[in-house]
Image (cartoon, rainbow, N blue to C red):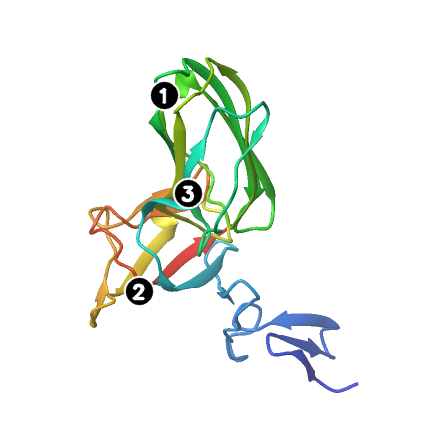
């Protein structure tokens, strides 16, 4: 069997009896970029065995307080399963805020969903976390939001559920410096290098990048994030 391509990124070397990865095991084999189903473009590199990921976030929405659920009434019989009018446009953190809590003095609230990696994630909040909340995980899809406990009748009390400005990555970050470039194409026009500590804030525990630290996200903004994933 002669040397031949198995895929755009691997070559069988008959003499060595092994597969060679493009741009890694043999520098003469060209490196290739190919998007996966989530829009990420992994590129095999020689950087400590990590993979360079390129993620494209197209025409994302600005952070909004009530785009997922506006004015959910909190006086129904428990458990209260929130009515979700929409889903996040891209994997991103979720905001949850009591519009009023004149009657409620304590609560237990759980959000469950799927993150950018396809893993199921769950977070539970109580009054100890406050009355204006933001998830740590970035949710690609919200499966449910449920209030399972409440002290007080909840009469007249409501909650908004919206989207925040931290977006989730499909790869794992081992260091904040692994996010090495972010390019923003503003809704109004010109692309700009949006990198640097003053503009983006990566977070390794939940593999998120806060895109609001340089400027607020405007509806229609596009971001391309380059990072090393372990």
Report x, y in % for residue 97: 36, 32
For the N terminus, the quadrant is: bottom right
Q: Secondary structure at mark 1?
A: loop
User: Which numbered disc flags the more N-terminal residue, 1 or 2?
Assistant: 1
Specify whether residue 176 is in view.
no
Residue at image coords 44%, 20%: 154
Whether pointer 1 and pointer 3 mark residues with C-beta atoms closer than 8 Å, the reply is no
Q: Secondary structure at mark 2?
A: loop
Residue at image coords 38%, 60%: 226
Q: Residues within 10 Å of mark 2 (few under 14, many from 20)?
A: some
Determine the CA span between mark 1 and mark 2: 34 Å
Q: Nearer the viewer, mark 1 or mark 2?
A: 1
Determine the CA span between mark 1 and mark 3: 23 Å
Report x, y in % for residue 143: 59, 43
Q: Nearer the viewer, mark 2 or mark 3?
A: 2
Asked if residue 166 is positioned above or below residue 7 in the image, the reply reads: above
Residue that mark 3 sits on = 93
Whether pointer 2 and pointer 3 mark residues with C-beta atoms closer than 8 Å, the reply is no
Specify whether residue 83 is in view.
yes
Report x, y in % for residue 205: 45, 36
Q: Secondary structure at mark 3?
A: strand
Asked if residue 174 is positioned above or below residue 171 in the image, the reply reads: above
User: Which numbered disc flags the more N-terminal residue, 2 or 3?
Assistant: 3
Q: Which mark is residue 220?
A: 2
Q: Which residue is more in the foreground, 111 or 86?
A: 86
Q: Nearer the viewer, mark 1 or mark 3?
A: 1
Asked if residue 154 is positioned above or below residue 89 in the image, the reply reads: above
Residue that mark 1 sits on = 101
The quadrant in which residue 55 appears is bottom left
Report x, y in % for residue 85: 48, 49
């Amino acid at each position: 069997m002669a040397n031949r391509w198995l895929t755009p990124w691997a070559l069988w070397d008959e003499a060595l009896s092994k597969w060679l990865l493009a741009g890694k095991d043999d520098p003469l084999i060209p490196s290739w970029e190919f998007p996966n189903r989530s829009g990420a473009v992994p590129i095999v590199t020689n950087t400590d065995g990590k993979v360079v990921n390129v993620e494209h976030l197209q025409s994302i929405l600005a952070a909004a307080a009530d785009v997922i659920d506006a004015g959910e009434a909190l006086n129904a019989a428990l458990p209260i399963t929130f009515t979700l009018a929409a889903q996040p446009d891209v994997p991103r953190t979720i905001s949850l805020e009591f519009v009023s809590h004149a009657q409620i003095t304590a609560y237990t609230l759980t959000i469950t969903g799927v993150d950018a990696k396809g893993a199921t994630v769950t977070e539970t909040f109580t009054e100890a976390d406050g009355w204006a909340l933001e998830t740590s995980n970035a949710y690609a899809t919200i499966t449910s939001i449920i209030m399972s406990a409440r002290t007080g009748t909840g009469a007249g009390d409501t909650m908004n559920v919206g989207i925040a400005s931290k977006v989730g990555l499909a790869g794992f970050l081992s260091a904040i410096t692994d996010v090495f470039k972010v390019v923003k194409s503003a809704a109004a026009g010109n692309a700009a290098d949006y990198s640097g500590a003053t503009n983006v804030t990566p977070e390794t525990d939940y593999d998120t990048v806060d895109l609001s630290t340089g400027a607020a996200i405007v509806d229609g903004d596009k971001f391309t994030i380059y990072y090393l994933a372990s």
